[in-house]
Image (cartoon, rainbow, N blue to C red):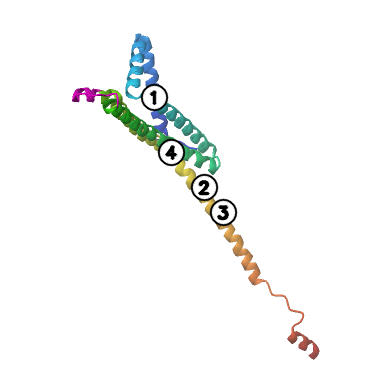
Amino acid sequence: MSRTPAATFGQGLLAGFATTLAGLVLLMAVTGSAGGLFSQALEWTGRNLGLAAAAFAAVAVAWLRGLFRLRDALADGGPPETVMHLDLLTDVWVGLFFGVGVIWTAIGMREALLQAIGPGAGGADGAAMLARLVDGGILLSLSTTIVGGIGGYVMRVVRALWLGPGLRRYYRAETARDVAAVRASLSGIERRLETLITRPPPSPTGDPDANMAGRRR
């Protein structure tokens, strides 16, 4: 399968992201600040995303694996069932990425409300209640909403730019193949009907006119 400019851009985008990430890690290791930055990154992730970070990462890895499998199926001309299944699966992973953000948004809001006005909250002024809301889950809910929304749309854009042209060509080829098979079947039926119409009917043995003609002779 020939590579289109959109597919080349998508592959370059992924390669550039991986190269930038690897370069950043190498730079931190060379400057000796990897430990501090890594611990800060873990602290920020735990404070803003919590366990949602692991769910986001798992869905993103599954989505990337599905994209590469779909790319290989398109390149090898796999069966339509496999291509359609992998195509649907990539959409499922994108929807699940959005879903993780929505689910942890609800979890964060619930925890924030329990911390602020729950049974153990007691009487508190406005500043203390606001602090409990932020520490209890408001920050988590907002962060997961942002990550889920941005990440989900980025996943859709990458899929459309990288594999969109190949998917359109594949589905057009399969549609043309189905149309050709239907036309061939209709042509066979038409030839069969023409043969039946042009074939002379057999003369009946018990025809009275034929018997009378035989007697006259």
Q: What element carries label 2?
A: helix
Q: Is mark 1 on a helix, strand or loop?
A: loop
Residue 16 seen in render: no
User: From which residue to which does the magenta span run?
Assistant: 119-131
Whether tag 1 and tag 3 are in contact, CB under 8 A, the answer is no
Comparing 28 with 110, the one in front is 110
Q: Mark 4, residues whose alpha carbon is within 10 Å: few (<14), some, or many (≥20)?
A: some
Q: Nearer the viewer, mark 2 or mark 4?
A: 4
Q: Which residue lies furthest to the bottom in this view?
A: 216
User: Which amino acid, mark 1?
Assistant: Leu
Residue identifier under label 4: 91
Residue 99 x/y as whole percent: 38, 35
Question: How much space separates mark 1 and mark 2, taking CA atoms?
Answer: 43 Å
Q: Mark 2, residues whose alpha carbon is within 10 Å: few (<14), some, or many (≥20)?
A: some
Comparing 214 with 164, the one in front is 164
Residue identifier under label 3: 181
Question: How much space separates mark 2 and mark 4, taking CA atoms?
Answer: 21 Å
Question: Is 23 on the left-hand or right-hand side of 169?
Answer: left
Residue identifier under label 1: 51
The first of marks 2 and 3 along the sequence is: 2
Residue identifier under label 2: 174
User: Which amino acid, mark 4?
Assistant: Asp
Q: Nearer the viewer, mark 1 or mark 2?
A: 1
